[in-house]
Amino acid sequence: MPPRSVRTTLGPLTERGLGLSGAGIVLWVAARTFGIPELQMAAVGVFALLVLALSFLLLGSTRLRVERLVRPGRLFHDATGEVELTVTNTSRLPTATLALRDRVPATLSSQTTTVVGPLRGGARTTVRYPVRGLQRGRFDVGPLTVSLRDPFGVVARRRVIGDPATLTVYPPVWRLPDGVPIGGATSSGGEGRPRPQPSGEDLANVREYVRGDDLRTVHWASTAHRGKLMVRQAESPQDPRVVLLLDVRRARHRGQGPSSSFETAVSAAASITYHVSARGRQVALVDRPLLAGPLVLPWQQWLERLADAEPDEVDLTALLQQVARGTAGDGTLVVVSTVPEPAELRLLVRAGRGFSTRIAVLVDAASHAGRPDVEVARAVAASAAALRAAGWRVTVVAAGDRFDDRWQELLRRPRLGAGA
């Protein structure tokens, strides 16, 4: 199949060609001025060389086809891959010398121009170069720019060939330690796949009594402590779902580029998605109000979506209200959010009541702006304490923190208090 994108341009003279042209002009002027026939012959020879070089390029083959293979097409952050280019001369005529340069973002590769010799009719050449996923996102690799040069290197002809391929780089994924309850421990089933089982710690999670609950599930110690009926809630092993709520509000995040609080939140969400999926859990990621029940997708698809994630204008209040009504389902709720304001905190506590396990990862956005604030630090601590009092497991991620260390803090069991 011929390439869909082919552009040919006869470029300007190369540096060597410009130098020869200047020398020819100087020789011609000197010959006419001083009447030296030898200088005039030298000038004619220079111009003849330029004409021969131009004729060589115009008569040579420019019918090229490029095949691009990106391996793998999806990279983990900081992992390496390879791009393979196969250039074929589809004509019977030979080509000129080829200088190949693929268009690739600087965050993926520091690739330089590769020079290969002329290709005979029907011949092909293969060039490979490495890529490294230093920044999450979806990137175009290509098209290929081919510069054809004459044997003397004085004239160049440029072609842009082929359509770009897509390379996806996942967000940074931290290897998280085991032990944090996510609605059940896992054990191997008969087919070798992990099957969730309710653990004793999950059975001890409590929520407020709702009319219709079995009175045999009342947790009397929590009822006496909080002054209201509290019931035990165990997650069914047949519904091993984790609802992951990600705060993408543009107005609440701080910082720029890879060191911004938004990137920290996306990396945390990607790490949690990968971690809980490896334990046999289904993941439903929500970041905006729902029109229907949340999608449950494999971790690969969620990481692809997170690779494209951008800050947006989102009504988090409406989303929390939907979660509180059960629109997102139940099981385990994991929230990756900037520090909530008091009204949002109340909604967040209410949204978590229908879940057996509640985990909050609070991203300290102010620390990512490089402006430490004592009042902000107090607000962060107060929000974390209020959530812990409501039975949540909470950790706070500041700028420069390792997320696997912060995740380790969630191993501490929450203490029920007077509530947020």
Image: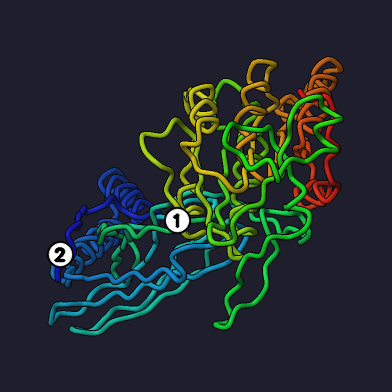
Looking at the picture, tell me which residue is in the foreground, 150 or 100.
100
Does residue 309 appear to the left or right of 149 in the view shown?
Answer: right
Residue 319 tag number = none
Mark 1 Cα shell of 10 Å, populated few (<14), some (14-19), many (≥20) = few
Mark 2 Cα shell of 10 Å, populated few (<14), some (14-19), many (≥20) = some
User: What element does badge 1 sit on?
Assistant: loop
The kind of residue tagged 1 is: Leu
**What separation in Å lies between label 1 and label 2 (alpha carbons)?**
54 Å
User: What element does badge 2 sit on?
Assistant: helix
Q: Position of residue 62 (x, y in %)?
A: 18, 68
Q: How many marks?
A: 2
Q: Position of residue 405 (x, y in %)?
A: 82, 50
Image quadrant assignment for residue 192: bottom right
Relative height, residue 189 to residue 144 (above, below):
below
Residue located beneath label 1 in the image: 297
The kind of residue tagged 2 is: Leu
Give the colour scheme of this rendering: rainbow
